[in-house]
Image: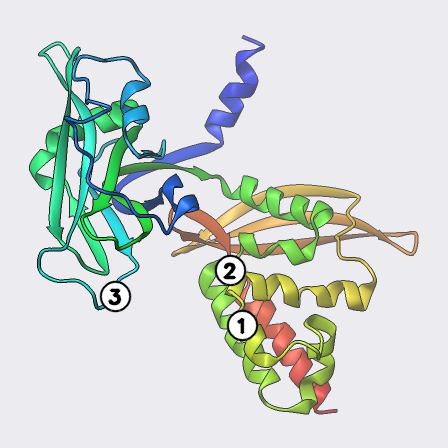
């Protein structure tokens, strides 16, 4: 029982939700693209052996194998998306296709023989080969947690990218708000503020980037703020190309430049509880820190909101305060 207790405690800190989603999963084949692959001839060497039911045979015969994420509890549909380096030298005879290598089973679910199914259509910049007419293989793919296939063209057109579009029931664990908030403050202690954007809600990150870029583009009055965050040697158009998450992490360099430390120094941390209010949840935490040998204890409210079944920090008000403070200081 003592060995089981840690596992039970971890289990109790998670809940799960199930919903139908479509997820795009990249193929390892992309490491070698662009690549030209011709349609496999199953009757020339190496001849496709329908009786070789060993676990490694189909992955060996196929050009690529894509793993199915563990959070899929069922598969409703699979499409293979193939992108090509298209040019003007194609005509109606040029084709894009995929050959999927799988197996048949008897009534008891035992493998009986290997088989191959395929999809073939006119070559385009992006061809999406859906297996709607062979949906019986979904149960095999889900059991094996992988799909073995070969994408090809009958043209010399190079394959630029291959991915799976998987639609099915997804059961993702939702970390408790206590765990998310605790992980956030632990990250501030170890990684530092400029690695904390991963905990923020994407809308918060986008809005913050838009607000700060508007200040930077407003002229030289915010040059000090820009210097302390990104540096004046980085052009604005380069800053603007950063993702909202990278932008936030770079911006939070201002904490190190103003306080001398990039990390949060805490003597103790206590999670006090949480309050639900419509679509938001407010976590209450008590933090003790030491400043100039004086211990300071404060209670903070951390707002959170669900995003894709995960709790994310919604620090819009706090970040707005940073923006307004810098606007006020620039007008002095």
User: Quick one: 81 or 227, which is closer to the camera?
Assistant: 81
Label 1 crowding class (10 Å Cα cut-off): few <14, some 14-19, many 20+?
many
Q: Position of residue 196 (x, y in %)?
A: 61, 54
Farthest residue, direction front: 45
User: Which residue in the structure is indicated by mark 1?
Assistant: 209
Q: CA distance from mark 2 to mark 1?
A: 14 Å
Secondary structure at numbered mark 3: loop
User: Of the residues tagged 2 and 1, which is closer to the observer?
Assistant: 1
User: Of the residues tagged 2 and 3, which is closer to the observer?
Assistant: 3
Secondary structure at numbered mark 2: loop
- Which residue is at a point 76% across and 57% down the rendered structure image? 262
- Which residue is at a point 31% across and 46% down the rendered structure image? 163
Model colouring: rainbow
| Comes first in the chain, label 2 or label 3 | 3
Secondary structure at numbered mark 1: helix
User: Which residue in the structure is indicated by mark 3?
Assistant: 87
């Amino acid at each position: 029982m003592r060995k089981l207790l840690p596992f039970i405690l971890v289990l109790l800190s998670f809940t799960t939700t199930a919903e139908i989603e479509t997820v795009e999963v990249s193929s390892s084949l992309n490491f070698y693209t662009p690549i030209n692959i011709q349609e496999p001839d199953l009757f020339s060497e190496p001849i496709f052996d329908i009786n070789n039911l060993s676990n490694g045979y189909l992955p060996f015969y196929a050009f690529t194998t894509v793993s199915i994420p563990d959070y899929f509890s069922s598969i409703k549909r699979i499409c293979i998306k193939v992108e090509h380096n298209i040019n003007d030298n194609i005509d109606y005879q040029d084709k894009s296709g995929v050959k999927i290598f799988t197996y048949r089973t008897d009534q008891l679910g035992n493998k009986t023989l290997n088989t191959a199914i395929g999809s073939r259509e006119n070559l385009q910049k992006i061809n999406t080969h859906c297996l709607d007419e062979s949906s019986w293989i979904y149960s095999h793919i889900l059991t094996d947690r992988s799909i073995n296939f070969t994408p090809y063209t009958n043209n010399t057109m190079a394959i630029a990218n291959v991915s799976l579009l998987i639609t099915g029931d997804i059961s993702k664990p939702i970390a408790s708000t206590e765990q998310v908030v605790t992980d956030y403050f632990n990250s501030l202690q170890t990684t530092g503020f400029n690695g904390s954007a991963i905990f923020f809600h994407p809308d918060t990150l986008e809005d913050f980037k838009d607000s700060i870029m508007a200040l930077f583009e407003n002229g030289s009055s915010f040059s000090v703020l820009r210097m302390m965050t990104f540096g004046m040697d980085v052009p604005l158009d380069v800053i603007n190309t950063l993702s909202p998450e990278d932008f936030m992490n770079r911006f939070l360099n201002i904490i190190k430049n103003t306080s001398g430390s990039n990390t949060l120094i805490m003597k103790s941390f206590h999670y006090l509880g949480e309050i639900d209010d419509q679509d938001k949840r407010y976590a209450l935490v008590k933090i003790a820190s030491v400043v100039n040998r004086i211990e300071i204890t404060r209670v903070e409210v951390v707002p959170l909101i669900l995003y894709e079944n995960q709790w994310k920090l919604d620090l819009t008000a706090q970040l707005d305060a940073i923006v307004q403070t810098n606007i006020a200081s620039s007008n002095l």
